[in-house]
Image: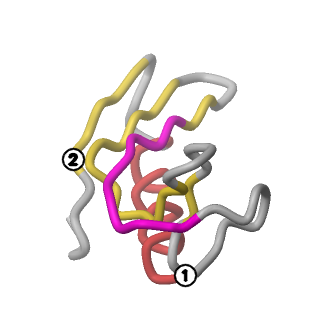
Amino acid sequence: MNCFFCGGSMEEGVTSHVVTLEKCIIIVKNVPCLKCGQCGETFFEDSVAERLEEIVSTLQTVVTEIAVVEFTRSAA
């Protein structure tokens, strides 16, 4: 797969995903992704993006300021 932005080669890797909400900041570590070896752009597969949405949705109701969590594929 090639990068949508620069055309570079995408490689499997992990990244941190940061979400800034009105009341809190959520950092999800070790998220599986495809990362461009040329420009560093990241791409999430659909299943990973859906899981990130679930994690953020769950945490935004209980976090008051900042949360740092590890990515897991299973529901918490």
Query: What residue is shown at x 34% (from left), y 56% (from top)?
Result: 31
- The amino acid on which the numbered mark 2 sits, given as a three-letter code, is Glu
Would residue 64 be found to the left or right of residue 53 on screen?
left
Mark 2 element type? strand
Q: Which residue lies furthest to the right in this view?
A: 5
Question: Residue 74: percent from the left, percent from the top?
Answer: 21, 76
Cα–Cα gap, marks 1 and 2: 18 Å
Crowd band around label 2 with a 10 angstrom C-alpha radius: few (<14), some (14–19), many (20+):
few
- Which quadrant holds the N terminus? bottom right
**Magenta-drawn stretch contains 34:** no
Mark 1 element type? helix
* Image: magenta residue range: 9-18
36 relative to 76, above or below: above
Would residue 48 be found to the left or right of residue 76 on screen?
right
| Residue labelled with disc 2 | 70
Which is more toward the observer, 73 or 35? 35
Query: What residue is shown at x 34% (from left), y 29% (from top)?
Result: 67
Is disc 1 in contact with disc 2, using a CB cutoff of under 8 Å?
no
Crowd band around label 1 with a 10 angstrom C-alpha radius: few (<14), some (14–19), many (20+):
few
- The amino acid on which the numbered mark 1 sits, given as a three-letter code, is Asp
13 relative to 22, above or below: below
Q: Is the magenta stretch mostly helix, strand or loop?
A: strand
| Residue labelled with disc 1 | 46
55 relative to 50, above or below: above
